[in-house]
Image: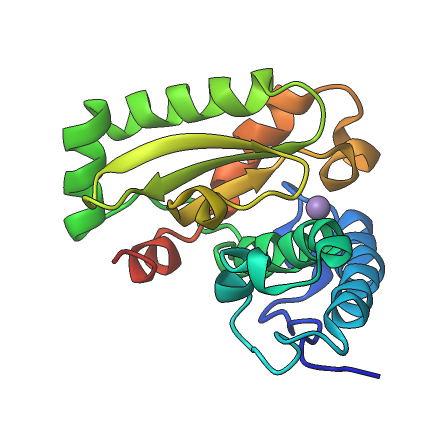
Amino acid sequence: MLMTFVLPTLDYAYSALEPHIDARTMEIHHSKHHQWYTNKVNAALEWTDLASETNMSFILTHLDQLPEDKRQAVTNNGGWWLNHTIFWSIMWPNAGWTPTGKLAEMIDASFGSFNSFKEQFSTKAATLFGSGWARLCQDNEWNLVLKRTSFQNNPVMVGLHPLMGIDVWEHAYYLNYQNKRPDYIAAWFNVVDWDKVSERLQ
Ligand code: MN
């Protein structure tokens, strides 16, 4: 069985993001959901021309190199793998920080202020219909843009580089927040590690 992609190890405990994200949600989201989609993307890539490719962004932007009947499975399961790998990496316990340096300047230039960015981002995330993600991305000209994607599509698939983003599928918050998605979004900002987001700038 192909094992190119593995479940990424978290640098913090499942309980570390409480009270903003509860331990049970983290444990299920990471150890059950992410493991499942990791297995599924490996299975979908097995015996294809991209079976030895280790860069998921490359795979998601070269789907035409896969047999037609594998493309949707790789999009769904590979997108799942990449989205969540980024998601875990940009969170940190009680980060509660605001952006600094170059990223802070770029956010101010693009959105007016950090608070204005946060408001626009939160509205996008709260009003996304159904399952998907809201993200801050960089475009080809290095501008910052807000981008929503449905299901497990990733912005790399439309030529954008994701810097940070929130999972607003119900599995990401339902145990603790039920239907109150805006409360989850507001709380999530307390665990965004802006240093990690800055490191993703291109
Ligand atoms: Mn998720």
Residue 172 appears in which quarter of the rendering? Answer: top right
Q: Quadrant of the C terminus?
A: bottom left
Colour convention: rainbow
Task: Report how many numbered discs are placed on residues in the image.
Answer: 0
55 vs 67, left or right, is left
Vertical comparison of 161 with 67: above or below: above
Q: Position of residue 15 (x, y in %)?
A: 71, 57
Q: Residue at x 83, y 36 (%)?
A: 175
Q: Position of residue 57 (x, y in %)?
A: 49, 61
Q: Quadrant of the N terminus?
A: bottom right
37 vs 86, left or right, is right
Vertical comparison of 179 with 108: above or below: above
Q: Residue at x 71, y 23 (%)?
A: 130
Vertical comparison of 195 with 123: above or below: below
Q: Residue at x 22, y 47 (%)?
A: 103
73 vs 81, left or right, is right
Q: 5 or 123, which lies in front?
A: 5
Residue 64 appears in which quarter of the rendering? Answer: bottom right
Q: Position of residue 36 (x, y in %)?
A: 84, 62
Q: Position of residue 7 (x, y in %)?
A: 71, 71
Vertical comparison of 162 with 54: above or below: above
Q: 25 or 7, which lies in front?
A: 7
